[in-house]
Image: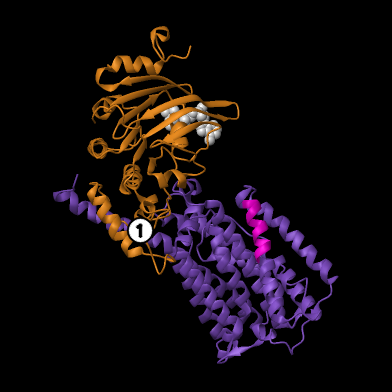
Chain colours: A orange, B purple
Amino acid sequence: MTDQEPGRVDRVVMRDIRKRYGMVDALRGVTLRVGPGEVVGLVGDNAAGKSTLMKVLAGAVVPDSGEIVFDGRPVAFANPKDARELGIEMVYQDLALCDDIDVAGNLFLGREPRKAGGLMLDVRKMHADARRHLDALNIRIPLTDIPVGGLSGGQRQAVAIARAVTFGPKLLILDEPTAALAVAEVETVLELIKTVSAQGVSVILITHRLQDLFRVCDRLCVMYEGTLRADLDARNTSLERLVSEIVAHDEGEKEGSRR
Amino acid sequence: MTATGTGTSQRVVTTRSARANAHIGRHAQTIAIAVVLVALLIFFAFSADRFATTGNLLNLLRQIAPTLIVATAMTFVISTAGIDLSVGSTVALSGSLLAIVLQHGWSPTVALIAILALGALIGFVNGWFSSYQNIPPFIVTLAMLSIMRGTALRATEGYSTPISGDLWIVQIGQGRIAGVPVPAILAVVVALVGWLVLTRTPFGRYVIGLGSNGESLRRTGVNTRKVGLTVYMLTGVAAAVAGVLIATRLSSGSSNAGSGFELEVITAVVLGGTSLFGGRASMLGTILGALTLGVIANGLVLLHVSPFYVQIVQGAILLLAIFANSKVWAKFGAIRK
Ligand SMILES: Nc1ncnc2c1ncn2[C@@H]1O[C@H](COP(=O)(O)OP(=O)(O)OP(=O)(O)O)[C@@H](O)[C@H]1O
Ligand SMILES: [Mg+2]
């Protein structure tokens, strides 16, 4: 959670990202920058385009135009695999897990431990590793062999978070990670964000719990109707200022304002 | 964030029951079909004299071999929430073409490879339209059902083509190894491999994931379209194998073979507890389902019941199985759908 030193290359820069869904202009030229180890809070009204922007960054949505530079290199993601290989992990707001697959299976989905020359799943190792990873993250799920469809909403979300942080990401995107969590679990996630960012992992956090943002974020980016409306320093921004940016009051005097 | 004191023991209790629930829920229908199968075996053993003889039971295994082989592949397709209605027509086309090319003097080995490749191609077309173009597989494979049956009829002009008993290839349908019919051995091997692939390989995982939540699977970086395409190629090849089995057993290729076969295969799969909505599969259930259908057909014939009733019974079983699958067993399951 230190200031970005000058001269250090940005972890990721998204430039002029645009995405249309039929008649809906979800993103109309968004530019976003995140430094190494930096925690950026991404806020905005419902349907402002936060999730879409992050899906672009995670490779789940291919933008119509715009460029992404990761660790100084221009990149283009055709699918989530490309982004995952570079170390970009995302906890999605929706459709995160496969209900019929068990906890360990979901945790390792897409990169299962294998044996017999890569042909077979190493199920035993999968469960043992899952146990270790969940314990290391203080996630309270006693069984790794029950389908996640049978877990509570918060437990499912914890599994999704564990999946994203377990494999040493360079950039962690959390889209409403605390929406289904109990108070203690929210604290754990906030601690987790501090821990990983101290290790140099960049974090983008989307949440409507504004008070949380001030506890972990270095910068706050406000989106409004598919554009980036404001880029604020978290330490000298008040909650009132942030709220007014989100709901688009006194548009005239704000820098970065669209109209 | 660790549970302490009474919280722990309570939690352990609830998770134990959650695990038991989840497992019983998953296997309830497989257990039920096993019970039904045993009951049927006992019933026919007492009511039909010749039923419980080794000869008849081996014959039964040979009869259900094509169904079991295609049902194994169909379990993969249905697990992805797909369906393949074209397997019966593929059976007819592959059997007919096999007989025709053999009559034209092709070597049986070349003919066999060509027919299997044809099955893969049919599966590729099914998979390309359903998986890469997102057209509902029900429609794609229904269209292919019509195209393949029409092609078979056109190729044979409606006549059946004999296959010479001198060729080694007829051994596939008629041969025995240590007294056991070759089709039965083949079917058991295919089912075992299918079970292994479904439960123990990454591909099997992705098949379940695709049916459970395809977008979630895609976001983990898995090429879901390729998985979707592959399962249709499996049913295509399996149907071609079934076509070869049936044609070589009868020593003739007929464009009328395999009519209603898709229904029988789908019934076997659904009867075994695999969900038509995807995500839930039981290869053991599919094997038991196919056996159950075979036992019913075989037993009814031995009891001198009109063969026309077999179809009626099969249709009724399919309806009942789907009803049980979606309404009754869902109550046991911990799975939300
Ligand atoms: N797959 C899609 N197809 C069509 N429209 C979409 C799709 N995804 C997003 N949109 C549209 O894009 C706009 C931005 O949606 P997005 O989910 O990014 O908003 P958000 O800022 O994440 O909102 P929330 O705070 O409610 O999560 C919305 O108007 C939405 O309807
Ligand atoms: Mg969102």
Which secondary structure lies at badge 1? Answer: helix
- Residue nearer the viewer, B164 or B174: B164
Image vertical order of residue A243 relative to residue B84, above or below: above
Q: Residue at x 37, y 23 (%)?
A: A221
Residue B243: image x %, image y %? 69, 73
Could you tell whether B21 is left or right of B295 in the image? Answer: left
Residue B90 seen: yes
Residue B50 seen: no
Q: Residue most toward the right? A: B157
Residue B209: image x %, image y %? 47, 54
- Residue nearer the viewer, A196 or B279: A196
Residue A129: image x %, image y %? 29, 57
Residue B220: image x %, image y %? 44, 48
Residue placed under numbered mark 1 in the picture: B21
Q: Residue at x 76, y 64 (%)?
A: B149
Query: Where, by quadrant of the figure, is residue A31 drawn?
Result: top left
Please provide the residue range marked out in magenta: B120-130
- Residue nearer the viewer, B129 or A155: B129
Check mark 1 vs ligand 2: CB closer than 8 Å? yes or no.
no
